[in-house]
Amino acid sequence: MDRKTFRKYGHAIVDWIADYMDHIEKYPVLAQVEPGEIADRLPKAPPEEPEEMEAIFNDFKGIVLPGMTHWQHPSFFAYFPANTSEPSILAEFITAALGAQCMVWQTSPAATELEEVVMDWLRQMLRLPEGFSGVIQDTASTSTLCALLCARERATSFAINEHGFRDGSSQRLVVYTSEEAHSSVEKGVKIAGFGKDNLCFIPSGADFAMIPEELEKAIDADRKDGHTPCCVVATVGTTSSTSMDPLRPIGEICDHYGLWLHVDAAMAGTAAMLPEMRHILDGIEFADSFVFNPHKWLFTNFDCSAYFCKDPKALTSTFEILPEYLKTDADRQVKNFRDWGIPLGRRFRALKLWFVIRSFGIRGIQQKVRAHIKLAKEFASWIREDPHFEVMAPVTINLVCFRYHPSHRTLSEEGLEQINKALMDELNRSGKMFITHTKLKGKFSLRLCIGQTNTTREHVQRAWEQLQAYAAHL
Ligand SMILES: *Cc1c(COP(=O)(O)O)cnc(C)c1O
């Protein structure tokens, strides 16, 4: 592609993006396609000859776009958000243009130093303890895996990095998390070699939060059996219901028994930037590591996961490698983020975070997040007022778990599941909104999460009207 064509399509694509954002509500939120439909419309073999940008861009619009689910549609209420914003998109353009590999300081000093600075901004915005150091990882799953590996190495004085697990003879290292924890904890436990048998699920209470007394009981029992309690993963804002594990009592237990405490606040972390919500991180000073995702609820497009640790030496001692070809004169004076995570290669992700924080300001971020939380509370109040619907879990931040429960019909749990699944599927097929489900203590629940950048009261109100209207026809 010559530079002239690049300019032409660069401008055309920016215009297309702005139009897309202006008219996003024309699109169905959930892609209305069948499995295989998109692949069937694409050539099976790569092109031998160069193709014109015109043809490529047209096929993007004609073939790819209909197969997209629109995460930036303000009626996207599914899962957790992965929101974005104009400044984030602009910074991604530049990151792509620079095409830099930010693995060590020398490979782009500004990338390393900007990352240090914006991560410390985030630390201040969350009021994390001063000693915490931050690094950007790709996802919360990776961040949690890093924490588990650090916990494993600290507990064994780096013996497993050195010698590997030895069958039979090695001690059993146990990881504890609540039964409501994200699946990435189990995945990390498997990858880090603890083995699923050594992941202990702690029961949660009626509020779906981990019961600290149960944690302590489990640790005691494992110690009596000669096992080695190693790590606790606590969740601030579980994926099913945004329940909040109480960090202070859990932290005190970890402190007492010398366990690594990792806190997974993948989505909910952002809420702690509001003074009135900071209590969700009460006790965070006990944590050895903490993760939250700006790519979920901080207007920064995927991927951008903020990982903080109390003792960076534990992290670098776990991950450090120094082949001859990566040695530089600056090594003694600078951070080399290559040693702060799993991959060697690193994207320049700090740039979009810097663009976002500067262009929103703390106040702008707080306004949006506060509005989302208020809308969730309001939506929950509408549910509570309707005798045919019920709220299924405490509404702690921006997620409402609920279900249709018609008061004039006697339905079994199974019947309620069927009718709610039908309601969800029909609404999602309409393309007007997108919600997902979970099970809470075995009960099928619908989830409506408010976090897309441009969601307003109108969108939430319309969602409620559609829920009521569709339910009435079931
Ligand atoms: C979304 C989520 C994750 C996984 O996040 P990724 O960045 O996609 O790996 C982990 N934990 C919790 C609580 C989450 O909500």
Image (cartoon, rainbow, N blue to C red):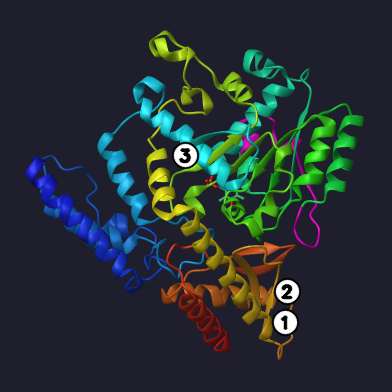
Residue drawn 22% across the image and 60% down it = 16
Where does the N terminus fall, quadrant-wise? Answer: top left
CA neighbours of label 2 inside 10 A, class few (<14), some (14 to 19), many (20+): few
The residue at label 3 has a CB less than 8 Å from ligand 1? no
Between discs 3 and 2, the one toward the N terminus: 3
Horizontal and vertical percent position of residue 135: 51, 34
In the structure shown, which secondary structural element does the residue marked by tag 1 occupy? loop
Tag 1 residue: 411
Residue drawn 69% across the image and 30% down it = 194
Horizontal and vertical percent position of residue 313: 61, 21
In this view of the protein, which residue sits in the foreground, 229 or 212?
212
Tag 2 residue: 413
Residue 118: image tag: 3
Residue drawn 65% across the image and 38% down it = 129
Q: Is residue 278 magenta?
A: no
Residue located farthest toward the right when viewing the structure as drawn: 224
**Which stretch did the figure color magenta?**
188-209
Horizontal and vertical percent position of residue 187: 61, 40
Disc 1 marks a residue whose amino acid type is: Leu
In this view of the protein, which residue sits in the foreground, 276 or 271?
276
Q: Is residue 94 left or right of residue 298?
A: left
| Cα–Cα gap, marks 3 and 2 | 48 Å
Residue 405 in view here: no
